[in-house]
Each structure stands twice: as C-alpha cells, then as structure tokens.
Image: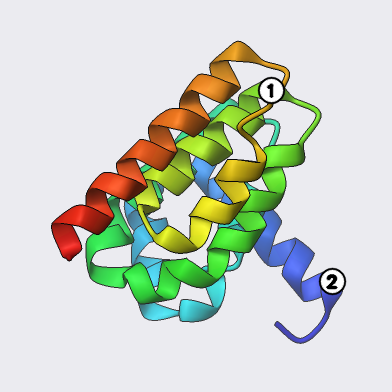
Amino acid sequence: MENKSDFESTLKMIADYMEKGFLENIIDMFKHDKSYYPFIGNLLGDERMGVRIGTVALVETLKDEEIDSILPAVPGIAKLLNDPNATIRGDAAYLLGIIGHKNALKFLEDALDDESDLVRETVEEAIEEIDNADILNS
C-alpha cells in the first residue's frame, strides 16, 4: 500500500465485499496478492458480523495452502484480544486457534484471565487446539 489512505480505502472495499457475500472473490484476491493478508486483523475487528464471519471463513479456507502468508496477520489478530467488545475478543481467540500456530500462544496465554467467561473458554480451547496441532506436527 502506498499510504494510509490507500490502506483504508482497500480495507473498506474488502470489508464491503465481504459483507455482501463475495467471499470467493476475496479468497482469489488474497491468493493473488499477498499484501492483503495484514488486513485480516482489521477485518475481524469490523463491527459488522458478516465481515467477521467472512474473515473466519477466509482464514479457514486459506490456512492449509497459505499458512506462511497468514502468519504475519497473527499480531494484528492478537491485538483484538484486548478489544472492549467481548465478541470480538472471542472471535480473535477462535481465529488464532484455527490458524493453529504456536506464535499465537503468548498472546492467548495473556488473555486467559479475560473478564468474560465465554472469552476465557474460547482462549482455553484455542490454546488446546494449538497444542494439539503442535503434537500432530511433531
């Protein structure tokens, strides 16, 4: 991205397409241009549920063949573990569990004392998911 304005307009375009259900188009965009992967955290933090659900579906679809491209998005997703909205914190923990990479463990461990029971439960499940993936990959 050239500048902040380009970043914001591209992010808005992707989020709007996601909300309209154009997931296949967005998957193709991400496959063909790796510079979009840092948008994942921003998309997951969107107030629109359709955008958040689409973002999870995007990562679920791409994680096996594009994991090296997804990993740089982990810190942006992990920032959402501190979001004021418990739903977004839970979504972030869930997505980190789906990604299943040990790089996310330090962020998740810091969120084990979340004020929300549901978020804590999701964090624990994500840690378990990553631990299980690590055992399978050993």
Residue 21, quarter of picture: top left
Looking at marks 1 and 2 on the same chain, the residue that comes earlier in the sequence is marked by 2
| Residue drawn at point x = 15 percent, y = 56 percent | 136
Q: Depth check: 11 or 114 in front?
A: 114
Q: Can residue 20 be seen in this view?
A: no
Depicted 64 relative to depicted 31: above or below: above
Indicate the quadrant containing the C terminus: top left, top right, bottom left or bottom right.
bottom left
Question: Is disc 1 placed on a helix, strand or loop?
Answer: helix
Residue 37 image point, x, y percent: 52, 68
Residue 130 image point, x, y percent: 35, 48
Left or right: where 122 falls relative to 83: left
How far apart in space, not on screen, are marks 1 and 2 (Cα)? 29 Å
Question: Is disc 2 placed on a helix, strand or loop?
Answer: helix
| Residue drawn at point x = 46 percent, y = 68 percent | 71
Depicted 80 relative to depicted 74: above or below: above
Indicate the quadrant containing the N terminus: top left, top right, bottom left or bottom right.
bottom right
| Residue drawn at point x = 65 percent, y = 58 percent | 76
Q: How busy is the neighbourhood of tag 1: few (under 14 within 10 Å), some, or many (20 plus)? A: some
Q: Viewer-nearest of labels 1 and 2?
A: 1
In the rendered structure, find residue 5 and report the number of the disc placed on it: 2
At label 1, the amino acid type is Ala
Q: How busy is the neighbourhood of tag 2: few (under 14 within 10 Å), some, or many (20 plus)? A: few
Query: Which residue position holds label 1?
Result: 86
| Residue drawn at point x = 77 percent, y = 63 percent | 8
Q: Is residue 34 visible?
A: yes
